[in-house]
Image (tube, helix red, strand yellow):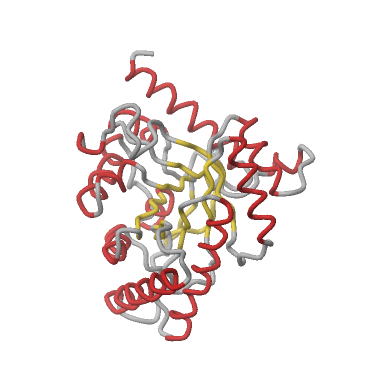
Amino acid sequence: MNSIKRKAGDKMAVNRAMFGPGGNSESFYKQGNKSTLQAPEWVKKVGLDAYEYEAGRGVNASDETFVSLGEKAKLAGISLSIHAPYFISLSSVEPEKRTGSAKYILDSARALSLMGGKTMVIHAGSCAKLDRTDALNFAKDAIHHALNVLSENGLYGFILGIETMGKVNQLGTLDEVLEMCSVDKTVCPVIDFGHMNAREQGGVFESVDDYKRIFDIVEKRKSPEAAYNMHCHFSKIEHTKGGEKRHLTFEDTVYGPDYVPLMQAIAQIGAAPTIICESDGTQAEDALEMKNTYAKYAGDIAGI
């Protein structure tokens, strides 16, 4: 894993992990905030570094809104990403849905361009109606098509982050995600540790080495940079035989995974991922809990 480490000041990568919420937490609104345009300054005041704009139901905001959000994030020093619409279905048995997914990816890229972000998070889709190998091949073809559409519109170069998924009938095991990422250098894995744990009904991440193994795999299958700068999601997730059921908060003591070994792992290997917390309503608070825990272990290693 030493090959993913970077020296301080390396322009290829940030030097510390960043943490933030996916969307706005309940406390954001309880404190009187009403607009996502207020999120960057609020996230900064809370003590976080990143914010993922949630466009699961469509990229519906105006260009002016995205430009303003980007300006406010830049002033606050907040890194922005976007979660692309859930309507994307790269593995659909219906060709028009696969090709149509490129429109949602294009919309997300346009928003990223206006915001000054670089990563969009994408769900590949279901494979409940066909063989997983066929679904994977459909998805790879759909990604090729989407990349061509981005190129035609001058928006090639943003990171298409394919997320590991939590339900068994969804395309999105780590191996499947990394195979989709082989399509192009701009297609990278988004590791959702809660999803991966829920998919296997728990027990996936019990130790520091369990987490380190994921970084090792991404480094070998994609690149050292993809491992070092990994975009991640984290939350505790209730699960059933079918995998993910619902997102929980860090107060839960029944389901996992435990975030502490992950903080130890990234500190020990010197990685600098962006970790977006998707806890149910407490995503900012739980993100800050992760950041503070990470700072403790990173400080210990650095001798601080």
Residue extending furthest toward the right: 32
Q: Position of residue 270 (x, y in %)?
A: 31, 31
Q: Position of residue 87 (x, y in %)?
A: 54, 72
Residue drawn where x is 54% and y is 47% of the image? 80
Q: Position of 253 compared to 45: left or right?
A: left
Q: Quadrant of residue 301?
A: top left
- Quadrant in the picture for the C terminus: top left
Q: Quadrant of residue 76?
A: top right
Residue nearest the observer in this picture, 17 or 263: 17
Residue 220 in the image: above or below residue 99: above
Residue drawn where x is 23% and y is 49% of the image? 217
- Quadrant in the picture for the N terminus: top left
Q: Quadrant of residue 137?
A: bottom left
Residue drawn where x is 65% and y is 30% of the image? 45
Residue 10 in the image: above or below residue 71: above
Residue nearest the observer in this picture, 297 or 143: 143
Q: Number of marks in the image?
A: 0
Q: Position of residue 65 (x, y in %)?
A: 69, 55
Q: Position of 50 compared to 16: left or right?
A: right
Q: Position of 104 compared to 161: left or right?
A: right
Residue drawn where x is 37% and y is 36% of the image? 272
Q: Position of residue 59 (x, y in %)?
A: 61, 65
Residue nearest the observer in this picture, 145 or 270: 145
Residue nearest the observer in this picture, 220 or 41: 41
